[in-house]
Amino acid sequence: MEMEYRKLGRSGLQISALSLGSWLTFGKQIDDRTAEKLMAKAYEAGVNFFDNAEIYARGESERVMGRILKKMNWPRSSYLVSSKAFFGSEDDKPNQRGLSRKHLFEACDAALQRLQVDYLDLYFCHRPDPDTPIEETVWAMNDLLRQGKILYWGTSEWSAQEITEAHLVARQYHLIGPVMEQPQYNLFHRKRVEEEYKRIYEDLGLGLTIWSPLASGTLTPKYLKGLPQNTRLFMDGMDWLRELVLREERIRKAQKLAELAKKLGISLPQLAIAWCLKNPRVSTVILGASKVEQLEENLKAPEALPLLNEEVIQSIENILNES
Ligand code: NDP
């Protein structure tokens, strides 16, 4: 099936409906050879966006991706690559994190070096920074735009109010506001995308690059019959994530969603990803994978989209609403 390309919000940029991210995998859980195979497989399938951040494996994820991009030698015009600033990649000294002009400038230069590219297509403020005026951040992002170091800027997990404030500042000084937001969105986590942002999609022309479409693997069959240890949730230091996502109620619902998927002749991950794609506000669903087979399975999710008719959507709602 041909890859679908969507507009990133009101911008002129076309982004593949499925993209590939590197959180917890590149430079950490998987070896570089697997990372290379994942990127090659994705690109072959029409994926044009690769997502990264300074904090991912503390810079190592960007280094791995940069080496792969260099080796692949794909035309620079054929793909989009991102970074995100906020959490830092070095120690936690003052100014080594946050959204101050100093950190945004330094983090951008460091990401460009690690990724071995001349500019970032997308650059995100990875979280809101209550210690920096939004005005300073908007100006810094616009200066990076003017310097040609980034092409589009956006936010990740900002409230509707914070995004609106950034646009008001941009309007006041004739600057460019954030074009995209990167929120979590999946069958288990919907409120912000479906309710909080409702008004700002049209008003601000906001696009979405959504993360964790499989809720870190809990929307796959792997936890239905046991607790496989060779997974993200059982990696060292991931107890916090495991406690957050591996809840009994979710497993029960995942079981029922898996049964529904089976009836439709698709897999649970395909159902979950197709469900995200069905929301027209979503510009791209960022996939994560620790194995090539997972990515192959997930890349077929668009084929399941026509199966999600009103009746199926209602069955999904019923399962999610069960207490
Ligand atoms: P998912 O929720 O889809 O989780 C991906 C993980 O689920 C894989 O690494 C794998 O983990 C497991 N998995 C994936 N497919 C399958 C399958 N078919 N069968 C079984 N297991 C499968 O997405 P991520 O949480 O990885 O998020 C995607 C991207 O979004 C990230 O790489 C990152 O770029 C971005 N992101 C952004 C955030 C932000 O704050 N802006 C936060 C988090 C992510 P395993 O094999 O180890 O179980």
Image (cartoon, rainbow, N blue to C red):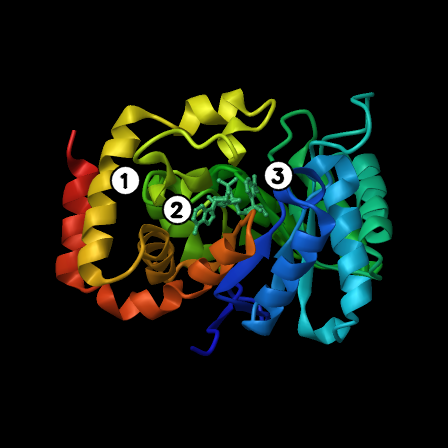
Give the image location of residue 77, x and y in percent: 72, 75
- Distance from the alpha carbon under mark 2 to that under mark 1: 21 Å
| Circle number at residue 254 | 1
| Circle number at residue 318 | none
Give the image location of residue 245, x and y in percent: 40, 29
Q: Is residue 91 left or right of residue 175?
A: right
Quarter-of-image position of residue 147: bottom right
Residue occupying the point 81% across, 29% down: 96
- Distance from the alpha carbon under mark 2 to that under mark 3: 24 Å
Amino acid on which the number 1 mark rests in the picture? Ala
Q: Is residue 3 left or right of residue 133?
A: left
In this figure, which residue is indicated by the disc labeled 3? Answer: 24
Q: Nearest the camera: 201 or 217?
A: 217
Residue occupying the point 57% across, 56% down: 20
In this figure, which residue is indicated by the disc labeled 2? Answer: 193
Residue occupying the point 22% across, 55% down: 262
- The answer, for residue 206, to whether it is visible in the render is no
Does mark 3's beta carbon lie closer than 8 Å to ligand 1?
A: yes
- Foreground: disc 2 or disc 1: 1
Specify which label sits upstream in the sequence, 3 or 1.
Answer: 3
